[in-house]
Image (cartoon, rainbow, N blue to C red):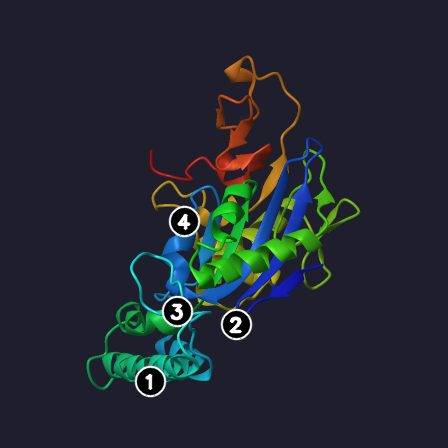
Amino acid sequence: MNLTQYGRAGISATVIKDSISRSGNRLLTYELVYPRIILAEANTHCMLEKNSSSSRAVPVEAAMKLIEESPAMPVEWGSNNSGMVSNEPLSELQRDAAIALWKEAAKSAVSFARVMSDKGGINAHKQIANRIAEPFTFMKTVMSGTEWENFFWLRDHPDADPTFRELAATMNIARAKSTPTLLQPNEWHVPYVEYQNGKYWASSNEEISLDVALKVSSSCCAQASYRKLDDSVEKAVRVFDMLNIGSETKPAHASPLTHQGTPMENFDGSVIGNWPHGVTHLRRDGSYWSGKFQGWIQHRQLISNEAKW
């Protein structure tokens, strides 16, 4: 069952899938909604896998209507001083003026984006027009990983950007309330797919094979680009085919395959040639990894053409 925690300023963190291995490695997948103004900071956390909504994918009019209904804004309104942390909040009068100005800037950006994309005029593509209004948009991000402590140590902290701190605190609360499911080797952590009694189930209560479950999960993670989700098996297969997985002639878009994993088997790692398929490296601390997952074999690492090497 998904567990959603809500924060201020339209921020939410939903635990989509929470799994733990026999060795105690916890793999957690979130679906996050937050103001785009902190996207750059979120992307600095390179140990976490991410797929996010894209200005290149959302139609201009749909994106502009979302801004008109609810423009994304900072969580707090601090006064100006030297340094990266605001020491004092604005006065009530100043804060109200700042919020009004922010909303007016959003309206202006929306009007310019519409002019830019007008088919009877400039007719610029959405990957251009949508950029104008990005500071006022919300992001949807699917984020997965086994390594969360540094993220929360840095971001659920008084010195963090207040909007990012709100997101991290909301995520941390959701994590604390969630109970991970114990998975055995060859059982898979598949976000957006149910796993019960040794079987995988689509949202339509249709039993599906592991191969299809991986495609559905990968497709749903890819669909974060569109900010809306169609988790039907038919749609999933179509989207998965568009990722070019397995193609010898087209580049694979393999990032949606980074969110699925299965616990590593116990194995003798002293002989590299005996490592299970998908194990990518050994760290100095003796831990075994598959991509960015510790103790889990990542779906992406099982794909032959997952990147150009």
Q: Which residue is mark 2?
A: 10
Q: Which residue is mark 4?
A: 253
Q: Which residue is mark 3?
A: 78
Mark 1 and mark 2 lie on one chain; the one further toward the N terminus is 2
Say which mark, if any, is on residue 104: 1
Q: Marks 1/4: CA distance?
A: 38 Å
Mark 2 and mark 4 lie on one chain; the one further toward the N terminus is 2
Q: Is residue 237 visible?
A: no
Looking at the rendered structure, the secondary structure element under dot 2 is: loop
- Against 77, residue 184 (above or below) is above
Which residue is found at the position 43% from the left and 52% from the top? 243
Looking at the rendered structure, the secondary structure element under dot 4 is: loop
Residue 41 is left or right of residue 109, and the answer is right
- Against 29, residue 170 (above or below) is below
Q: Quadrant of residue 14?
A: bottom right
Q: Marks 3/1: CA distance?
A: 19 Å
